[in-house]
Image (spheres, helix red, strand yellow):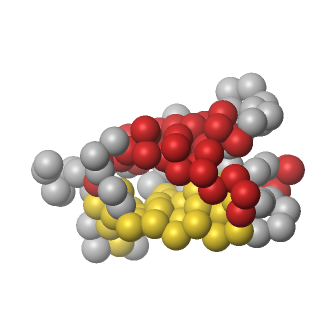
Amino acid sequence: MKIIETPNMPINNGHYSSCIEQNDLLYLSGQLPIDNVTKQIPSTIEEQTLLALTNVESILNEAGSNKSNVLQTRIYISNINLWDQVNAIYSTFFGNHKPVRSIIPTRELHFGCLIEIEVIATNTLKHKN
């Protein structure tokens, strides 16, 4: 097991790693829609979905992978009625690539966020597309 940490990755406030590599797979902790520079959270579910996905992509890039190597996503949303908006942004973000996915409705998420996204991906340093 290898913990992936770089200066460009977000600093964790809790007792966890953002990314761990094991057997050529990358496991990412859930990413909230918080801007890594300003620490701001957008107001709409569309903006929050895109920012959470962008945060995922940033960590994947730092680990030597990219969004086309995502195998599985788990998406936690604060209200199941947000499903359609999340799906629209998600499908645009991934394009033709369709990782397996679960969308889990929850109650509240940390900091009042509407969405949190975690992924498992392959590592392109070892698996070229």
Q: Residue at x 35, y 72 (%)?
A: 22
Question: Relative to 25, is 67 above or below?
Answer: above
Q: Is residue 72 left or right of residue 35?
A: left
Q: Is residue 127 left or right of residue 76?
A: left
Please tell me in which quadrant of the rendered image residue 2 appears.
bottom left
* Residue for point 76% across, 69% down: 106
Vertical arrangement, residue 47 with respect to residue 94, above or below:
above
Percent position of residue 70, x then y? 35, 57
Of residues 16 and 101, the one nearer the viewer is 101
x, y percentage for residue 88?
A: 52, 44
Out of 85 and 105, give the one closest to the viewer. 85
- Where does the N terminus fall, quadrant-wise? bottom left
> Where is residue 7 drawn, in percent x and y?
53, 37
Residue 72, picture quadrant: bottom left
Please identify the quarter of the rendering in which residue 10 is found: top right
Looking at the image, how many numbered discs can be counted on the residues?
A: 0
Name which residue lies at 45% across and 55% down: 4
Q: Is residue 60 above or below residue 74?
A: above
